Amino acid sequence: MKAAAASAYPVVPVFHPRREARRAVKRGYPRGSGTVRLCRSVQAVKQLLEQRLVDAVVLDVRHCDGDGLALPASFPRIPMYALSAVRPDDGALLASCRDAGFTGVLVEGVDNAVAGEWIAARTAQVARRVALADAPRLLRLTDRLQLAAWEEVLRRAGRPIKTGHVAAALRVTREHLSREFGAGGAPNLKRVIDLARAACAADLLGNPGYTVRGVVRILGYASPSHLAGAARRVAGATPVELRELGPRGVLTRFLRGRTRSRP
């Protein structure tokens, strides 16, 4: 994946002191799902959470301080996984992971071979896709190119998207994609891009650790007013109201007469 394209996809920060465990996650992570970032500290993980669209977080809880264990409470919509060596007498450690809100525990040395693939199947992106699972049918996306474009838009929702970006990824011309995407009564592609990004913003705002301004920064909106405009066009909502709507609520609002072309 080229650097420019990779920056459009979600990241998975991994904090672990042992190289083999870090590399196990990176090796097994599907290339089209996002990018694994190896972090030297919990602080580096927190910086990525502030700067990029994060799909999941992997931590060695044996080497985490209180900040690391507090992350699931601040970001409940971003799956957090513990990857640690576990001994028979580690009941208290496992209980602390459960109480902190970790999504799952992977046993270092036992689960290394499946860690990347297993995590990739249980990310924030996957949860958003589940929430929007019937969007293609509701949006009248039936053609293979329409469906492929929808998938690419979802993958790229973490950064500003242009029709040309999607067309290049699908190896068609921008004009052809624009014409074919809106066929059969479907909304035009620009409108659907607005929908996907607003749904992503709504999902992020469901995390207490994110403010509206923080989500604006992560998703690359020019300003809070630009996010407000997108939320109004897509869902007739304010950015704060997106927090309550969630991705599914944004789709429902969009279908109520907001599928026409944006100005």
Image: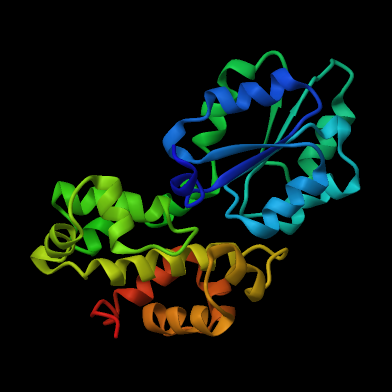
Count of marks placed on residues: 0
- Residue at the image point whose x is 54% and y is 39% from the top: 35
Is residue 45 rendered to the left or right of residue 160? right
64 lies above or below 49: above
* Residue in the foreground of this view, choosing between 88 and 15: 15
Which colour style is shown? rainbow
Where residue 168 sits: x, y (%)? Answer: 28, 50
Extreme residue toward the front, this view = 3
- Residue at the image point whose x is 72% and y is 42% from the top: 102
* Residue in the foreground of this view, choosing between 140 and 53: 53
Quarter-of-image position of residue 244: bottom right
Is residue 164 rendered to the left or right of residue 112? left
Quarter-of-image position of residue 89: top right
Is residue 197 rendered to the left or right of residue 142? right
- Residue at the image point whose x is 61% and y is 27% from the top: 25
Identify the image quadrant of the N terminus. Answer: top left
196 lies above or below 62: below
Where residue 251 sits: x, y (%)? Answer: 37, 68
Where residue 93 sits: x, y (%)? Answer: 86, 31
Is residue 257 rendered to the left or right of residue 91? left
Where residue 227 sits: x, y (%)? Answer: 51, 78
Identify the image quadrant of the C terminus. Answer: bottom left
- Residue at the image point whose x is 28% and y is 59% from the top: 164
